[in-house]
Amino acid sequence: MRALVWHGANDIRCDTVPDPEIEHPRDAIVKVTTCAICGSDLHLHDNFMPGMEKGDIVGHEFMGEVVEVGSDAKSALKVGERVVVPFTIWCGECDQCKRGNYSVCERSNRNKALADKVFGHTTAGLFGYTHLTGGYAGGQAEYVRVPMADRTHIKIPGGLTDEQVLFLGDIFPTGWQAAAQCDIQPTDTVAIWGCGPVGQMTIRSAILLGAKQVIAIDRVPERLAMAKAGGAITINFEEESVVERLNELTGGKGPEKCIDAVGMEAHATATIDSMMDRAKQALMLESDRAHVLREMIYVCRPAGTLSIPGVYGGLIDKLPFGMAMNKGLTWRMGQTHVNRWTDDLLNRIQEGQIDPSFVITHTVPLDQGPEMYKTFRDKRDGCIKVVLKP
Amino acid sequence: MAYYDRSSAGDTLARGLGWFSIGIGVAELMAGRSIARWMGMEDKTNLIRAYGVREITAGVGLLALGDPKPWIWGRIAGDAVDMATLAEGMALGSKDNPRARNAGIAFGAVLATTAVDIVCAQKLHREEAHYRSLPVPDYSGRSGFPRPVSAMRGAASDAPIAEDMRTPKILQFQPATGQAGAS
Ligand SMILES: NC(=O)c1ccc[n+]([C@@H]2O[C@H](COP(=O)([O-])OP(=O)(O)OC[C@H]3O[C@@H](n4cnc5c(N)ncnc54)[C@H](O)[C@@H]3O)[C@@H](O)[C@H]2O)c1
Ligand SMILES: [Zn+2]
Ligand SMILES: [Zn+2]
């Protein structure tokens, strides 16, 4: 089959690789009809995440048709069914899964021993996302093996297009959880850094959850325009001071809820801290750039909440932790517990409360994937979200 | 769009200059004394070492993933400082410095790299102007909602959110007597 394969920094190729096979009775094989490139894939493409190996198939936002089911998954899944696959693989039986903490499932990471060493305790297995999280082959491919498939799926009823439901596998619940874990009150101002696909979903979620005021921060004009369309007040961080504007919009008190939908590749305009970050990252003294985190800690209202869906991979430096501690901030973060939210969100899509396909700007065949990684990363051609058709 | 592109011609040149900076910087740092002696400017050894640090910083900045423009301008400014120092050595040269000729050679070399730096900066600025001139696609109609935003605010306030993600009551912002937050 054809699949997008990681070969190193800035080197993802469309290769011919062996078809996946059922390896375990709980597996299923899904024939991918539609998949997408996620902002998290860019961290792999740019080689900021440790633990990738040459030959790994990437992609973790995908859906398709079940074509083969292992004996232990047959009660839950049938050949021919249409499913979106969540990027977090979960067993449904461990202590964490029982609490709905699917992204830290204790059993789905087959490289548990390695993850235990690196993270202290393992997190869940993820598709197409480094050997620290299981090294499972990803979904930017014609076929995918889905482990623990009796749990790891979202069944899709007829009458909805792939484009409407695809993002249930990642960015829609990610934006939703980012907003939900802020426990938004009708009096809240929610500030969201990053107007990429995750930021866009977060903006819509914060509006639906009833935030009084949603403020979105980025520097890419068309992304800001899309944020505005979704109901956000926008700040272009290259043109105005984020801290000043946020204080202005909150009567000098700062936003109650701050969300980092940027992650470790944050940009900043020539501030000292960002120059230091870049230099250290280049010298491998620091793996992540923490400009957004620093800004959030500084501007957040005391006793407020920081929600961090943006992905970090390792070490950050010069984090004003004293400021965070003294202000009594609550931190909530993590990979998304996708299936915790998807029944409710699928309902909302069916009822027409939201149509997540608004974010798609580019649809291309799978073999154009490698170029689209660059188009998406460099935000060329108005690109916000890329959908691939195997 | 980003106003720079890490695979453009200007950027490739910038990265080349980044490696060049690191090379020169390491040489100045490690062999500061020999370089100074070769030009008859022994008293400037520490200064040359400091320039080495500057070069390495610029090199690392250019190789990191960000916008190379400020670093290239930094290099140009650095070139000017280098030339000023060398000019001093050359001027001194006529009487006190028998090796002034070597300082002159170094001056010529710096002048040549300055020219490359300037070409690079121009290329990068031209590329930026090009990116900025590209039309911005109109996404103002892409709300994702079936009705105006004002009608959607709070439409999902009934959503099931488990207790573990709720803020404990005591930590919630109480609507102050009067009004809460900003207007
Ligand atoms: N927690 C999860 O489960 C989960 C799931 C999906 C994605 N993510 C992460 O979410 C993040 C965003 O993903 P995406 O798909 O939207 O990617 P993206 O790269 O398209 O979006 C990032 C956006 O942040 C903007 N940005 C950069 N620096 C900024 C700054 N200083 N201030 C404000 N905005 C800034 C960029 O211009 C860009 O528009 C990534 O880190 C991704 O890995 C997390
Ligand atoms: Zn993702
Ligand atoms: Zn589990």
Image: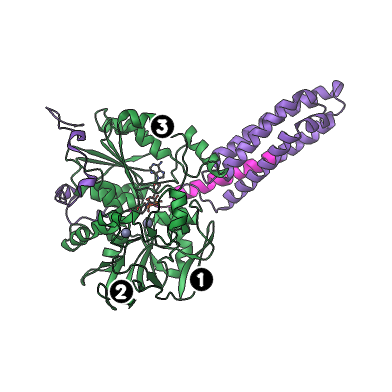
Chain colours: A green, B purple
Q: Which residue is mark 2?
A: A72
Task: Count residues near mark 1 (Cα–Cα under 10 Å), then give few for <14, some for 14-19, many for 20+.
Answer: some
Secondary element at image label 3: loop
**Which is more toward the observer, B96 or A288?**
A288
Is residue A271 visible to us here?
A: no
**Ligand 3 is found in which quarter of the picture?**
bottom left
N-terminal-most mark, 1 or 3: 1
**Which is more toward the observer, A136 or A117?**
A117
- Residue at the (34%, 76%) spot, across then down: A70
Q: Chain of mark 1?
A: A
C-alpha distance separating marks 3 and 2: 50 Å
Q: Is residue A328 left or right of residue B166?
A: right
C-alpha distance separating marks 1 and 2: 31 Å
Residue A339's image quarter?
Answer: bottom left
- Residue at the (28%, 57%) spot, across then down: A97
Q: Could you tell me the amino acid type at mark 3?
A: Pro
Query: Picture coordinates of residue A283 (x, y %)?
Result: 58, 43
Q: Could you tell me the amino acid type at mark 1?
A: Asp
Magenta-highlighted residues? B113-139
Q: Which mark is residue A320?
A: 3
Residue A172's image quarter?
Answer: bottom left
